Amino acid sequence: MIDDDRIVGGTQASPNEFPYQISLRRLGSHICGGSIYKSNWIITAAHCTDGTSVGSMSIVAGEHSLSIDSGDEQYSDILSKTEHEAYSSRTQENDICLLRLSSPLSLNTKVNVVRLPAQGAETAAGTNCVVSGWGTTSSGGSTIPDILRKVTVPIVSDATCRDSYGATSITNSMICAGFRLGGADSCQGDSGGPLVDEGTNLLIGVVSWGIGCADPGYYGVYTQVSYFHNWVVGIAG
């Protein structure tokens, strides 16, 4: 069972702790996370937007509670979407999408951009990264939390991840993170959201897929952003 992802084993984030985090909405309801790349560009997962019309999507930046307005929120409709031309819904390869906003965000301490790693940069196994989102808090759960949550997970090597999922399932454009014994992971509703290096604050991954959530022996699989640096810059500058 391949699940779209959520935070398991984490804690509530502080308000605006992750100013680059956005909530992607479909017809007003939260469906995925995303990251602010520029004031008018969002990075998310292609599987979040695949088959969904631009007109039905919108984003909220500066969000903390999904139900209570703090006054820090900024809203925008989507002008266009660019899913990676080689995205595969079967294998989840190249699971990345750029959303162009119809109205640019006003950047401040509570709504701000995330930086990208260099093209081809590798993140060492053991590097601690933080993943955030409003996804469900248990494997198979359907209720999403109201408050943004976060969890710290270490990067694992491609070889270790392939031992779990099979040699052909984990491609060079993917990166894995989590614990062999499970207990902490992203989950349904976190998809498209950020995996950020705690040391450098670079956007290492986009929440993509996994088997279960925080299940022993299976890691969270993310789109490896460094693999797509040039693709992002070529479209969004």
Image (cartoon, rainbow, N blue to C red):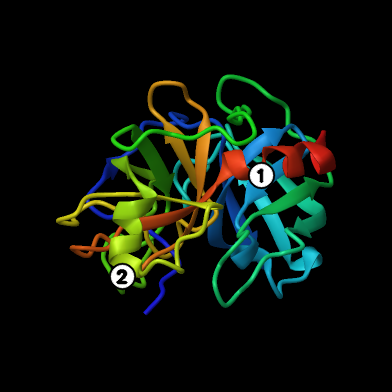
Question: In the figure, is residue 215 to the left or right of 54?
Answer: left
Query: In this picture, is 212 found above or below 78?
Result: below
For the point 45% across and 68% down, the residue is 169
The answer to whether residue 221 is above or below residue 157 is: below
Q: Is residue 108 above or below residue 155?
A: above
Residue depicted at 45% across the width and 61% down the height: 170
Q: Of circles 1 and 2, which is in front?
A: 1
Foreground pick, 104 / 230: 230
User: Dividing the picture into quarters, in which one does residue 82 lie?
Assistant: bottom right
**Image quadrant where residue 215 sits:** bottom left
State the residue in front, 233 or 26: 233
* Kind of residue at disc 1: Phe
In this rendering, would 65 be left or right of 115? left
Mark 1: secondary structure: helix
Q: Which residue is mark 1?
A: 228
Place of residue 177 in the rendered image (x, y in percent of width and height, measured from the top left): 34, 48
Q: Which residue is mark 2?
A: 212
